[in-house]
Amino acid sequence: QQGHWLHWVYALVVWYVVVVVQMTVYEAQAAFLPRRFKWLRTMPEPRSTTVLVENIPSERRSDEELRRFFCELFSEEKVKSAYIVKHTGRLQEALARKAAAEEALHTVTADWERTGKDPAQRPRHLTLTGQFMDSIEF
């Protein structure tokens, strides 16, 4: 039935629950904050003084610019240092492949030099396409 008096009771009960839950959450937050501040103050450095920041704008992606930003935000004496760290996983993989290739080049070059650099003995290897490639030039 539209306009039934029980709708008003339901509305009042819903608002009562909202107010009680909100008050309970605020009280819990007020009790929690002193504990959190105490915990942060007793934590050892650098953990207690480190902040992880993501999605830094491109104009701030240097140590100096990031430090300047935090000094503006807080103060010069509050900011110890600021460092940009980038994801270097792919770079490290590429450097490892480069080091392995350089080691392989050194090995085949040394083997060829032991043969007196005889052009007929120049090292070659078979590629996936079935062709022989010069191991030193490759």
Image (tube, helix red, strand yellow):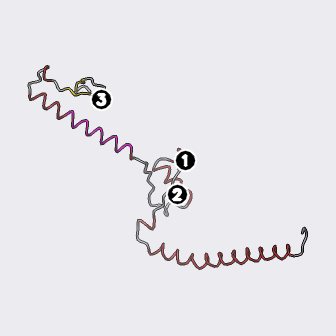
Q: Residues within 10 Å of mark 2 (few under 14, many from 20)?
A: some
Q: Residue at x 40, y 71 (%)?
A: 44
> Which corner quadrant holds the C terminus?
top left
Residue with the mark numbered 3: 128
Say above or below: 123 vs 61: above
Nearest the camera: 78 or 45? 45
Q: In the rendered structure, which amino acid carries the disc numbered 3?
A: Leu
Residue 93 is inside the magenta segment: yes
Q: In the rendered structure, which amino acid carries the disc numbered 2?
A: Cys
- Residue 23 x, y percent position in the rendering: 69, 77
Nearer to us: label 2 or label 1:
1
Residue with the mark numbered 1: 57
Say above or below: 122 vs 37: above
Nearest the camera: 102 or 11? 11
Mark 2–mark 1 Cα distance, whole angstroms, equals 16 Å
Q: Are dots 3 and 2 in contact, CB under 8 Å?
A: no
> Which corner quadrant holds the N terminus?
bottom right
- Residue 8 x, y percent position in the rendering: 86, 74
Q: Specify which label sits upstream in the sequence, 3 or 2.
A: 2
- Rendered image: mark on residue 45: none
The segment highlighted magenta reads 90-105
Toward which corner of the image does residue 100 lie, by quadrant? top left
Mark 3–mark 2 Cα distance, whole angstroms, equals 56 Å
Q: Residue furthest top?
A: 119
Nearer to us: label 1 or label 3:
3
Q: In the rendered structure, which amino acid carries the disc numbered 1?
A: Pro
Q: Are dots 2 and 1 in contact, CB under 8 Å?
A: no
